[in-house]
Image (tube, rainbow, N blue to C red):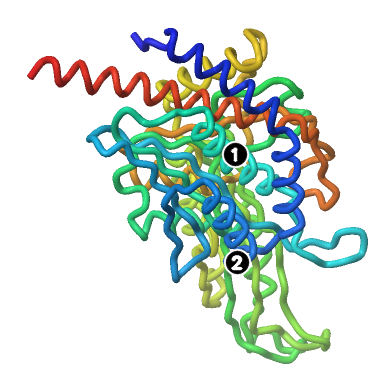
Amino acid sequence: MILLHNTQINISLTSIKEWVKNNNTLLLDNYDKLHDLAEVSWKEQKTRDFICNELDKLGLPYETYNNHFGIVVKWSSGTPGPTIALRTDMDALWQNVDGVWKANHSCGHDAHMTMVLNTLRCLKESNFKPDCGCLKIIFQPAEETGKGAHAIINDGIVDEVDFLLGIHVRPAIEIEMGQASSAIYHGAATLLKGKIIGIQAHGARPNLGINVVDSLGAIIQAVNSVKVDPTIPSSAKVTQVNAGGENINVIPDAAEFSIDLRAQTNKAMEALINSVMRAVQYAGEANGAEVQLEIVAQMAAAEKSPYMEVIVGEAVRQVLGEKALAHPPVTPGGEDFHFYTKKRPAIQATMVGLGTGLEPGLHHPNMKFNLASLGAGVAILATSVIKLFEDQTKGVKDMQSLK
């Protein structure tokens, strides 16, 4: 049984709600500045500098890196115990916004940074201190590339992390304003790019060439014919094709194509990748052409953590009310947060889905949401951190008493 209710938690929750109420202007100011500093993946330098300046004000130690613009705060108790981490993404998308191409925070990363940064500030200014272990705050670059989490993992930043928590603003069609979920069940995504090499010939003598358009047709049909476990949502489709030059009477000898794969679980994605790659090779090379196919981007599916969902669910109820806990949305959209648990299975993780009234949708160039939700996000994250430390500290003390 997980013990979640006691005097310490209730006092901390009161302090957290009071902090959020008194610091709404600060939240909005931080958000506005981060929104205006929008930078694309791997180029988040000004964003990093702003966050570092805010961390300097808090007086907590942090690290920056030479190979990317991530930041890691380590708030240690000085005694052995669990490592609990909060993670936020930093990058923006490059989009055409009302006729102007620019970096644009249309996926809510500006909001995520605001909430995680101020969760740390809220905890410190509410006189919270880890009883054992440490709290890590991870500002992660390049989520939109699907490779930012890998950079954090490769640097060993999560090697000692036991529990990991993230947050993401959700569209109004998924979660209502004033509600939140204890998880987001993102699906897995894989993007493939391929090349076909044939032989040119005169259109009057196609028997002397190898027509890559024939290969493309066979590949499209093969991809559409792939079948995997029908009980798990998945899809495979060719999304780009390019072949031939300006002359209609020439058999083309080169083509390029792209394939988008989606599956609700990592296991189903592995099966889908194997089936599609095998089908593409067989179908595309049946006429003698050479087919080259590679994975250019991937996102992992969410792995459920019942323990973390209980912790966060209790936090949502305490912050927003008993009826505010929404069912975790199931979405085919990708999120590289889930690579942390795929690459480090010992980590228990979940991502809060925050109802924000977001419209018309994520990645829309004119995406908007209700900024009043920022305070709710801070309160949920801060309360979840306290609950995790309390529950884990109790476990450590119980173990020590048995020695």
| Disc ID at residue 28 | none
Q: Residue furthest right?
A: 99
The residue indicated by pointer 1 is: 118
Residues under numbered marks 2 and 1 in contact, where contact means CB atoms less than 8 Å apart: no
Q: Residue furthest bottom?
A: 202
- Which one is in front, 24 or 366? 24
The answer to whether 290 is drawn above or below residue 101 in the figure is below
Badge 1 amino acid: Asn
- Which one is in front, 330 or 229? 330
The residue indicated by pointer 2 is: 45
The structure residue drawn at horizontal position 37% and vertical position 26%, both measured from the top left corner, is: 389
Q: Is residue 300 left or right of residue 180?
A: left
The structure residue drawn at horizontal position 39% and vertical position 46%, both measured from the top left corner, is: 74
The answer to whether 271 is drawn above or below residue 38 in the figure is above
**Local secondary structure at mark 2:** helix
Residue 56 appears at what percent x and percent y? 52, 53
Q: Answer with mark 2 or mark 1, whichever residue precedes in sequence.
A: 2
The answer to whether 284 is drawn above or below residue 255 in the figure is above
The structure residue drawn at horizontal position 66% and vertical position 30%, both measured from the top left corner, is: 354
The structure residue drawn at horizontal position 77% and vertical position 35%, both measured from the top left corner, is: 371
Q: Is residue 348 left or right of residue 393?
A: right
The answer to whether 373 is drawn above or below residue 193 in the figure is above
